[in-house]
Image (cartoon, rainbow, N blue to C red):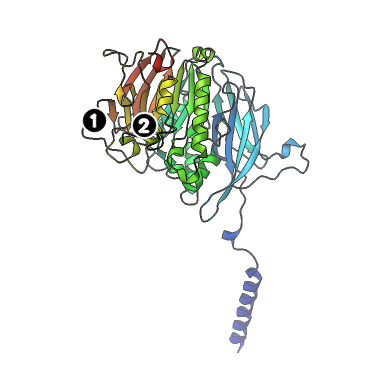
Amino acid sequence: MVNLTLLCLVLGLVFASAAEIKDVPNALDVNIVHYQPEQVHLSFGERTASEIVVTWSTRGLPPTAADADNDNGASSVVEYGLNDQLTQRAFGQAVKFVDGGPKQMAQYIHRVTLSELKANSSYVYHCGSDFGWSAKYQFRTVASADPDWSPSLAIYGDMGNENAQSLARLQRETQLGMYDAIIHVGDFAYDMNTKDARVGDEFMRQIETVAAYVPYMVVPGNHEEKFNFSNYRARFSMPGGTENLFYSFDLGPVHFIGISTEVYYFLNYGVKSLIFQYEWLKSDLERANLPENRVKRPWIVIYGHRPMYCSNENDNDCTHSETLTRVGWPFVHMFGMEPLLYEYGVDVAIWAHEHSYERLWPIYDYKVRNGSLGSPYENPRAPVHIITGSAGCKEGREPFKGKIPEWSAFHSQDYGYTRLKAHNRTHLYFEQVSDDQQGAIIDKFWLIKSQHGSYNDL
């Protein structure tokens, strides 16, 4: 009888405890707020020579001080300075981003612009708030606002979370100070929206070891399309005020132009962006070709994701003779970009999308227009196209046709990336790094021009 009474008491206590716990949320259901900065990356501001934009994410928005004038309560802060000292502070804003996936995952993306930076100087910085700070990073500002210096860049596309073959070498070379900027020509993470944007988060953490040290300039690719490119638009901070779709900036003797080739393909989002970009591109090229601008920065380099030409063995648009980006809309041929590149004397067009590397002879409308038989890249009579989409992703390599067209000068399936050094106003140097061959240079060439301008005048 005693044992039965004891059992009843124990069961009563268990049920009573369960009733009390019932109203307490499961630990897995608690909305744990994160204030720690992550996914830190840099980009050029509107003034390339003196502005850097620092961008990062937090899971929750750090509380701000009740007193708006109290800077100590700001939620988006960068502390930075020279000589390894965090002596200056800059403040910005955070925007809530909600992914379009089933879980509607949310995060806050912070942006702070560092202004009036000294040229050719090394700054240290960290970002966050009084509720959490990032690690301390450093960057070096551009050598000068003037064109007479020689910037170095690494350029590639199509790098994912998985199989990111080029990442380790890029991390090391960036932290050794080899580059003044990185250009990622579309297709990130594979894909940023996958698994409720967790793949995008992991990718941004992965590239932090590059992008937190040097401006990481980007354009969208087809793998960013989901939810009208929402992850891409939200996560990056390009100049120009177009949600990172198209913009331009000057670096040394080069005028760089980033565009979205995707506005030609995803017309389900409307044609407004395509028309707007085309008119903007024409205006930007006109401005770059003003005599006082072209003599100062004679080189014009454009980059976008999908190529106008390629010799790969697949059914991608660049394997067709009337590529949409090249000739424009079918039949009516409106908004084609190749005539603009020819008319305004664009020197180099850089693409990705194909998971391979290919260098073309100077080309316009499928006609090779070399400078001369002996020196094809000296004073060429058309733009030079380069495809560099082999940084590594889970989709692997891209095959080439059995018979390579005569306009293709070199091609390789090796994983790797491209380096560009703008030596001066007359000489550009390109080389292709192979990750398959432990960093060996598998292709290189000089582009030499004694005069720049419209190819119509040649």
> Eyeballing the image, is 363 above or below 266?
above
Residue 404 lies left or right of residue 293; in this view the side is left
List the single residue furthest toward the bottom.
1
1 and 355: which is toward the camera: 355
Going from N to C along the chain, the mark reached first, 1 or 2, is: 2
The percent position of residue 103, horizontal first and vertical second, equals: 53, 55
Q: Which mark is residue 380?
A: none
Please state which of residues 183 and 166 is positioned toward the viewer in this rendering: 183
Tell which of 396 and 60 is nearer to you: 396
Give the image location of residue 108, x and y in percent: 60, 44
Closer to the observer: label 1 or label 2?
2
Residue 245 in view here: no
| In contact (CB < 8 Å): disc 1 and disc 2 | no
Residue 385: image location, x then y, percent: 36, 26
Residue 26 in which image quadrant: bottom right
Residue identifier under label 2 = 308
- Name which residue type carries label 1: Ile
What residue lies at 77% left-to-right and 44% top-to-bottom?
66
Q: Residue furthest front?
A: 332
| Residue 431, visible in the rendered structure | yes
Q: Amino acid at mark 2?
A: Met
Q: Find residue 404 and name its label.
A: 1
Q: Count of labels shown?
A: 2
For the residue labelled by badge 2, is the local secondary structure a helix, a strand or a loop? loop
Q: Image height check: is 320 above or below 200?
A: above
Report the residue at 64% width, 22% height from top: 116
- Compared to residue 364, the image places residue 219 above or below, namely below
User: Could you tell me residue 207's position as x and y percent?
Assistant: 47, 36
